[in-house]
Amino acid sequence: PGRSGYGMAMQAAEKISECRENLARLFGIADPLRIVFTGNATGAINLAVKGLLAPGDHVIISSMEHNAVLRPLKKLEKAGVELDIVKTDADGRVGPEEVAGRIKENTKLLLVTHASNVTGAVNDLAALGRLAKMHKVVFMVDAAQTAGNIPLQAGLMNIDLLAFPGHKGLLGPQGTGGLYIGAGLCLDTLMEGGTG
């Protein structure tokens, strides 16, 4: 797909377009072209955080984040990104009040998991999204455990970046995933070459 105009290539391109449109409907995304495909949720998370954050930026995460979030951010921390880890409440959820107390002038990103892969605790994305929007902070959600299982509405929840796997709740094959990149966001590239 995208490399030629013969029949099978065109059919494959149509399937990719159909997949983007279905994902956009499922996740409440206005523009299907803002969805990029990756090899998994970990790839999507790396693409987002490494494409968005620069030395001097401040990012807030919760203490319940998966290593797919924690490890790339720990590497970025060594390069000058400031990392703030908020403890969860007694139910294992991230409280908006706790996050609000950590927001600073250089806070660029609030990144939380929708649901913990350890406890199953589900975060209130709508409340966290409202908080992020109010403070003009990019709001990213790791939906590795919930995409296809628990409703997500990126627009209504003010989600700017949404990472998801294809092989879990979406019932797709291994080696698939994606990243929704909200309008107005432009991520730096991790790789260059070919057609970009």
Image (cartoon, rainbow, N blue to C red):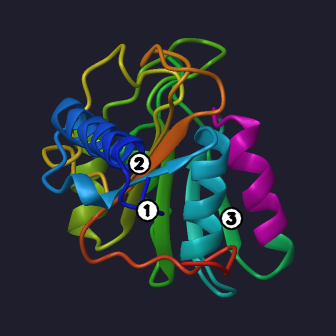
> Looking at the image, which residue is at 84% across and 65% down?
75
* Front-lying residue, 109 or 163: 163
> Looking at the image, which residue is at 36% across and 19% down?
148
**Residue flagged by tag 2: what amino acid is it?**
Ala
Q: Identify residue for label 1.
A: 4
* Front-lying residue, 112 or 103: 112
Residue 99's x, y, as percent?
44, 52
Q: Sequence-wise, which precedes: disc 2 or disc 1?
A: 1
Q: Is label 2 in contact with label 1 (beta carbons under 8 Å)?
A: yes
In which quarter of the view is residue 196 placed? bottom right
Magenta region's main secondary structure? helix
**Residue flagged by tag 1: what amino acid is it?**
Ser
> Looking at the image, which residue is at 79% across and 70% down?
77
> Looking at the image, which residue is at 38% across and 53% down?
6
Classify 10 Å Cα crowding around label 2: few (below 14), some (14-19), many (20 and above): some
Q: Identify residue for label 2.
A: 9
